Every structure is written in C-alpha cells, then in structure tokens.
Amino acid sequence: MSEKWIEHAKTATLVTLVTISLVLTGFLWFSSPGYQTNPPFTKYDLTYIYSGTKYNDRAAHQLASPYQVIVHANNKISWLLPEGNTYARLTQLLQKASFDSFTTVAPTADMWKTLFTQAPGAELVFPRDISVQYADAFFDASLLQKYPLNGLDSISRIWFFYNPASKESFVWFISAQDQQIVQAKVDLGDKHLEDEIARSSMTKSPPLTAVFADGKAPWEQKNPSGHAFSRFFYLPTSSLPMNEWSFKLTSFDINEMKKWLIKDPSVEPFVTNKNEDLYMNNNEFLTYNKKGNFMSYSQTPDDTEPGTSNLYTDLAHINNFVQRHHGWTGNYLLDDVRSNDNNQYSFRLLVKGYPVYWSANVPINPDQIQLQTNNNEVIKYYRSVYILGSPDRQRTLSLPGKAELLQSLADKKISLSTVEQIYPGYQADGIAGKQAVLKPVWIVITTSGKRMFISSP
C-alpha cells in the first residue's frame, strides 16, 4: 500500500475516534444529574399520601397559632378554639396587627382590675411559655429587634385590649417567668378591636372564671403597686361537657412516601430485621418500623455555607416540605421548639379544636409530627403512618369544673404555683383493632415540663 493511502487511512481512523469520543462525551454530559431537564419527582406518577387539602393549604404563620383565644367582653370571659370560624377571623386580624411604642409597664391594682373586668380584650394562649422568636413567627410585624420586648426570656400570654378612657388599643406581652410586661400600641388598620371583640364574644362558650396561682387577683395583693403578679388560668365554673370520640384509623403506603422523599424512589429496602425496612440512597435514609407503624427520614445537609434562618423561615421550609406530599393529615399546630446544633420542631394534632396526646407505648404516634432543620432545609422527619379517619361513634362526657379540678390537683399535691398551663384536650387510648378512642381530659403542664391528665372521676 502506498504511503498516500496509509496517510488517508490514518486520517480516517483519527476522525472516527474523535467522532466517537464526542458522541460519548455528549451522552455522559446529558445523562448526568446536573443536566436533567426535570426534577426526579416528575418522572414518577405520584399520588399524595393524603387526599385532604384543608390543612395543606396554609401559611407558615398559621402553624404557630395559639391553642386558645380568651375573650373578655361585658365582664364575661369565654374562649375560642381552633377549627371555629370566629377563631380564624380574630386570629387572622390580630396576626396582621402593627405595633408601635414598645415600653415596659408596671400595672397598678386599678389597671389589673380594669383589664380583667372592664376592658374588651383577647388573650392568645399557647400550650406553654413561648419565646419572642415564636411570637415573631406568628405576627406579620417583626418583633425580634423591638426593645425591650426582645429582652424577655419567655412570654406566657399575649393580651390585646381596648382602653375606653384613651380610646386606644394596646397589647401586653406578659412574662410570668421574668415578672415583666412589655406594652405596645396596636393598629388594626380599618378594623376596631372593641368591635371585633364584641362580635367574637357572641360565640358559644362555657362561662369561665380566672384562677390565680397564688390565690389572689393582682388587684387584691398587699403590694399597692401591683408590680408582682402570679400566673393565672381560665376554668369553667361548672363541669365541662365534651364528646368522647372513636375514630377509624387508616394508614398511608410507605412506598408512596418513599417516592416523595427519596431522590431515587426505585431503591429497594434492606430488611434490617423482621420489623424494620431501611431505604438508602446516597445521603438519604428512610426507615419504616412495621411493628410500631412509624417512619423516620433523614438526609445529610449539603456541605455549603450556613444560611441565615429564624423560627419563621424554618416554619416556612417545614411547611413547604410537608405540603409537598400533603403530609398535614389533620390540624397540626406548633407544640414545642428546641434549639441545639439543629432546631427541633414538634407539631401536635388538634381534633375538634382540642389537642390530642397519645398514650400508646410507641416512640412515634399520630398525635405528633417531628422535624429537624439545618441550614435552611429539613434534615429529619418523624411521624406515624396512621391517620385518623372518620369518627364512627361518639358520646358526651363531662370534665370536672373549677372546684373539682382544683381539689383533684390538691389531692395529687400539685400546687398551682408550680403549674404553667391548664387546658382541655384528648388522651388517645392507644391503637386497638385499627381504632383510636379520644377521651376528654384536663391537661396540666408544670413549670418543670411534667405533663399530667385529669379526667372525670
């Protein structure tokens, strides 16, 4: 073969090799994860783990809503509970309030008496003392830079009221722990607090009376300045009728949850033992405990610069994360926040406006959803796979009224001075035959964090 043909052959071979190289390189580029035109989830025909939309179409601040609103009007005290239209209207109005002129106040005896017996008002009551960050997450207005409010260690209640003398509206951020009260002027735009309170007071509610931890109202204290004050609670004067509910239990398919959470939902489980399946994909782990019917999901956070976050932004990320698969399978409100290396959030289920506490001896139950955040993303997610279905029966019971409840606490040697909060709720009687019985109870939270239940005798 002549040298000319040899050179042509070499050239042709080189062109062929270069062409093959380019084709293979392009194939690798466009098949790599960074060049996917769609996110992983769109490749699968996904169904929501829960078909309900009512609680999966809420803003982040609604997760930080109070468990009760105590309404003061015409020398009458009543409550509004979540799930009610009046509660929703009033909390939405107060959530959008604007604040000005923050200052520390030391109420006199007359000011306390006016507040309890004359001034139209509404108290936001949470399951326990909350931080200023917690309050900031609920309100549209920013509170974190407001002095002296940002100096409070905790807030035990938030009390809006209208002063008939000055014809102005105010709010008190009351800290029983710090024995301090921070006041601010309130602007509700074109709404008037006294009118909204009058409208809200028309809602059906048991008559309530204020009970003071030290046995005396602030205006009855020997200290004429009225600077010191005790915690106080609102209890019905007579027994409280409440329904006991029996709910059917359903559950979502862990495979549906796997498709939503794992970036490669085709992964098959490792059977670590007869009661547990483990799904792993790179830095993601999903564990399903078949015996306890609960799941845990975790992912290692990206190794990037930490982002700025606060409780509100964390709630926004959590809300988006859970809403993506319709994971709010009921009315869950923020119950507890703990900050360590990661921020830990616990959300509690409310049924018919009352919080639910499970009694089954299982680590994770349907009454709570727990998540952890880090660097502006959810890194851990714990929940039961059980969901409360429709109620299949109910009966009316009665919780003890004020006198009986206080006597029960005395019999248990529980001093009111050690109690942080008292409110009605449900104790779920475990899971049996795929049913859950929700029994009415008084929930008593002590200042040490202990929780106890008091039911009908």
Image (cartoon, rainbow, N blue to C red):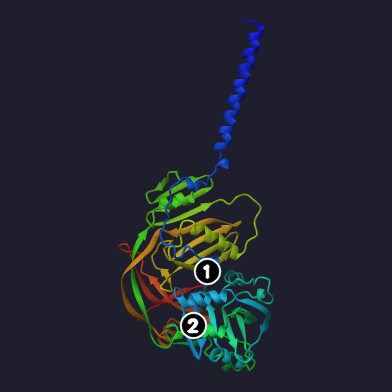
Q: How far, Cα to Cα, is label 2 from label 1?
A: 19 Å
Mark carried by residue 217: none
446 or 439: nearer the viewer:
439
Q: Which picture quadrant has residue 388? A: bottom left
Q: What is the number of callouts on the image?
A: 2
Q: Which picture quadrant has residue 392? A: bottom left
Give the residue drawn at x 66%, y 85%. 105
Pointer 1 residue = 62
Pointer 2 residue = 200
- Decide which of tag 2 and tag 1 comes sooner along the chain: 1
Rendering coords of residue 47 (x, y %): 42, 53
Q: From what the image shows, is residue 52 above or below residue 355?
A: above
Residue 445 visible from this viewpoint: no
Rendering coords of residue 170 (x, y %): 62, 83
Q: What SS does tag 2 mark?
A: helix
Give the residue drawn at x 49%, y 59%. 323
Q: Amino acid at mark 1?
A: Gln
103 or 176: nearer the viewer:
103
Quadrant where the N terminus sits is top right
Give the residue drawn at x 47%, y 58%. 382
Rendering coords of residue 114 (x, y %): 58, 91
